[in-house]
Image: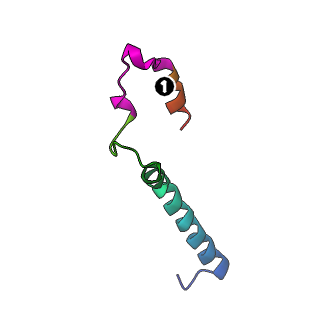
Amino acid sequence: MDDLAFDERLAMLVEAEWLNRQNTKPTRALKEAKLHISNACIEDIEFAKERKLERKTIRELTART
C-alpha cells in the first residue's frame, strides 16, 4: 500500500465503498420494504386464477432487475 500514490489509494477506497453499497442494496431494500414474508421469492408466487397474475408479466418484470 505504501508504494501506491494517494490518488490510487483513494480510488481503491472509493471502489470498495461502491462495491459494498451495491452488494448490500438488495438486502437493505428488502428490509425497508417491511414485507410480511421476509423470505419471499419470485419462484414462490402463486398464480391462482382469482389473483389475476400473468406469468408472462411477472417474467418481464423480473427480467428488468
* Place of residue 62 in the rendered image (x, y in percent of width and height, measured from the top left): 50, 32
Other-residue count near label 1 (Cα within 10 Å), few / some / many at <14 / 14–19 / ≥20: few
Q: Residue at x 37, y 28 (%)?
A: 45
**Residue beneath label 1, please?**
58
In this view, 56 is above or below 6: above
Q: Which of the colour schemes (rainbow, by chain, secondary structure, one colour) is used?
A: rainbow
Q: Is residue 14 left or right of residue 55?
A: right
Total labels drawn = 1
Residue 21 shown in magenta: no
Q: Nearer the viewer, residue 1 or 48?
A: 48
| Residue visible at 36% across and 43% down in the picture | 36
Q: Front-most of 17 and 3?
A: 17
Q: Quadrant of residue 9?
A: bottom right
- Answer with left or right where residue 47 lies relative to residue 15: left
Who is closer to the viewer here, 10 or 54?
54
Give x and y (percent) for residue 10.
Answer: 62, 76
Residue for point 46% across, 55% down: 28
Give the structural element (helix, strand or loop) at label 1: helix
Q: Residue at x 50, y 54 (%)?
A: 25
Left or right for 44, reference 61 = left
Q: Give the residues drawn in magenta, as a range.
A: 42-56
Q: Is residue 55 magenta?
A: yes
Task: Return the residue found at the far right.
Answer: 7
Judge whether 42 appears above or below 11 on screen. Answer: above
Residue most extreme to the bottom: 2
Q: Amino acid at mark 1?
A: Ile
Query: Percent from the top left, x then y, of residue 21?
Result: 52, 60
Image location of residue 22, percent across then percent down = 52, 56
